[in-house]
Amino acid sequence: MFRAFSGRRGALFAALLSVLFLYFGCYKAIVHPAGDFANYYTASRLALSGGAGSLTLYDHFWFQNEIDKYFHNTLGSFIPFPPSTVLLLMPLAWLSPHAARISFVIVNMLLTAGIILMLGRITKLPLRLVAVLVLLSGISLWSNVREGQMYLLLVFDIAAALLLEQRGNYFSAGVLFGVMLPIKYITLLFVVYFLFRKNFTLFRGAVIAVIVVFAAGVFFTSVKLNEYYLAAILPQHLAGNIQNPFAANFQSFHSLLNRLFVPNETLNPHPLASMQWLASWLTTAFPFFFLGMIISAIRSVSFSDDSEEISYVVSLLVTFGLATSPASASYHLFLLVIPIVLISAIAMRGELEFIQRRMASLVVLFAATNFLPLYKLYRFDGDSIFTLLAYIRLGLLTAFFLLLLPPQIWRTSFFRRASVGAVALSVLVILVRSQQTVSKDGAVWAGFDGLIIKHPALDGNSVFYLRESPAGFVAMKNRTLTNDDPPMPRRISRDSMWTAFDSTIGFSRQIFLRNNRTGAAEQLTHAGDRNYEPVWTDDDRRLYFLSDRGRGIDCTTIFYLPIDRREFP
């Protein structure tokens, strides 16, 4: 199979892929910039100027206004990034936004070459073959450069750490794994794996690096911001509750199962079936099942040396991290270059017979995942059973993982025990979650035709928001909540007796109503983590407000509360 990538044909193929990378990745990044670069750059500028310490860093309105100082017509948000993310673009933050963008494109070109070199040294494969496999990542590679993402840096970091580990520089390898861990959590899988291998030197290096990076993040932000992230942002992110937790563009089991079995009046009015318990159980159980498969696979195969085992296990862990991620995008899939190159080396050395037999299928799956315009199928999202067609990319990724497993694991007693353990653990987690009650407050979804995603402002009584389509967020809209002309910001009722306001309770934001005569205040909202910007209607019988309830930490829409003022003191 690898003969197709050898000789003159391989050189021509690598040249073609390089041209595509330079055009669709590098050139497009400069001419048509998009994505998260504005978020990273703005956060680093704020950190250097001392403005990244307050909780407003996670406030959509405030952070959007900061982005507007550097970028034109670019929507952004710092959610769900960890606070330490402010460190990433500090070396470029002293440049103008345009100069920093061009510099980062050049950095990504150098990182791509470095990744090819590192993986070539790890595997001893011809660099031409490694270059073809890396550039075969196609859309995921291009989107990383075009959108200013950090996954080339992450893959370079992982590859360099693996090379150092292979050469016996365990402490330095651990440092490289640990440097990225407070920002991109997937390196935790490798640190835990090497800990189980009793490589305590590597583990020590990782721990020291994590402490240093985390401390630097706290220094440039604040202790309070990090506490808020750990208490309010991280749990929601790990649970997949970010932006629209039903959307196919996130390609996760969490969003798929939500779409099929969890009704939601705003985001999912027509599920295949109303079986929220099934979605909850499967979402919890899948990671345990996948881990059970990995452990069973490791126990079922033998290797001639440790380096081959490490390459195989790292390939499984990377694919596991992608397949079980609560929210993934096309640029995340660039991580697949690690397993495709490492597994190719194992196949060429004839180490695992089943990998040799499946290598062509693995390369085809890898290329299909990265080159086919699978987003075209997003139009089936929410269309009952046809929703499955919108999740083809997730299916290809899962198939890639399953092809890495030896056929004999399905017959082992350990796998059967691991399956029983996965069921038991997932049931236990669900039982613990079931004890967490959600207060009802009578708020009603306003029924408007869009979601407020990364919106710039609530301007008086007019709301600006992005309307979602299967292809993404495509149109800026506005909607007037009241008939005031011109609209005026109204937190105070017309008789001047009542003031509606929002305030932070712990790590959540809730709506309150205050009697201006007595000063007594009563909390109106209890559900959701972010309820804010209350606005009275003309007749003072309703309070409109923004809330993330039933959605995610980066996904708000409009609700209202019927107000009977006789009920309040």
Image: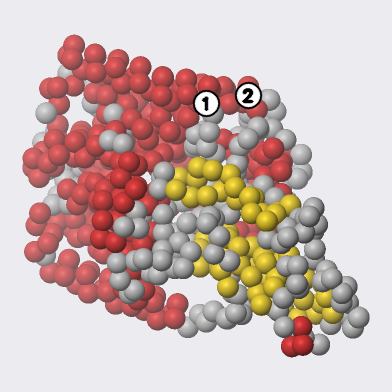
Locate residue 537, reporting x and y percent: 73, 67
Q: Is residue 23 left or right of residue 94?
A: left
Please, is residue 182 above or below residue 99 in the view?
A: below
Q: Is residue 41 left or right of residue 188?
A: right
Look at label 1 and name its amino acid.
His
Q: Which residue is mark 2?
A: 98
Q: Pick whichever of labels 1 and 2 is earlier in the sequence.
A: 1
Q: How is the image coloured?
A: secondary structure
Q: Is residue 178 left or right of residue 67?
A: left
Q: Quadrant of residue 408?
A: bottom left
- Taking depth in this image into account, of 184 and 216 the one nearest to the observer is 184
Q: Residue furthest right?
A: 517
- Is disc 2 placed on a helix, strand or loop? helix
Locate residue 246, reporting x and y percent: 41, 59
Locate residue 181, reporting x and y percent: 49, 48
Tag in front: 1 or 2 = 1
Q: Quadrant of residue 198?
A: bottom left
Count residues near mark 1 (Cα–Cα under 10 Å), then give few for <14, some for 14-19, many for 20+: few
Look at label 2 and name its amino acid.
His
Locate residue 415, reporting x and y percent: 17, 66
- Taking depth in this image into account, of 447 and 402 the one nearest to the observer is 447
Which residue is located at x 64 percent, y 62 percent?
546
User: Quarter holding the C terminus?
Assistant: bottom right
Please, is residue 245 above or below residue 514 in the view?
A: above
- Is disc 1 placed on a helix, strand or loop? loop
Count residues near mark 2 (Cα–Cα under 10 Å), then give few for <14, some for 14-19, many for 20+: few
Q: Which residue is mark 1?
A: 32
Please, is residue 517 above or below residue 557 in the view?
A: below
Which residue is located at x 83 percent, y 75 percent?
498
- Taking depth in this image into account, of 120 and 68 the one nearest to the observer is 68
Which residue is located at x 82 percent, y 71 percent?
493
- Taking depth in this image into account, of 22 and 117 the one nearest to the observer is 22
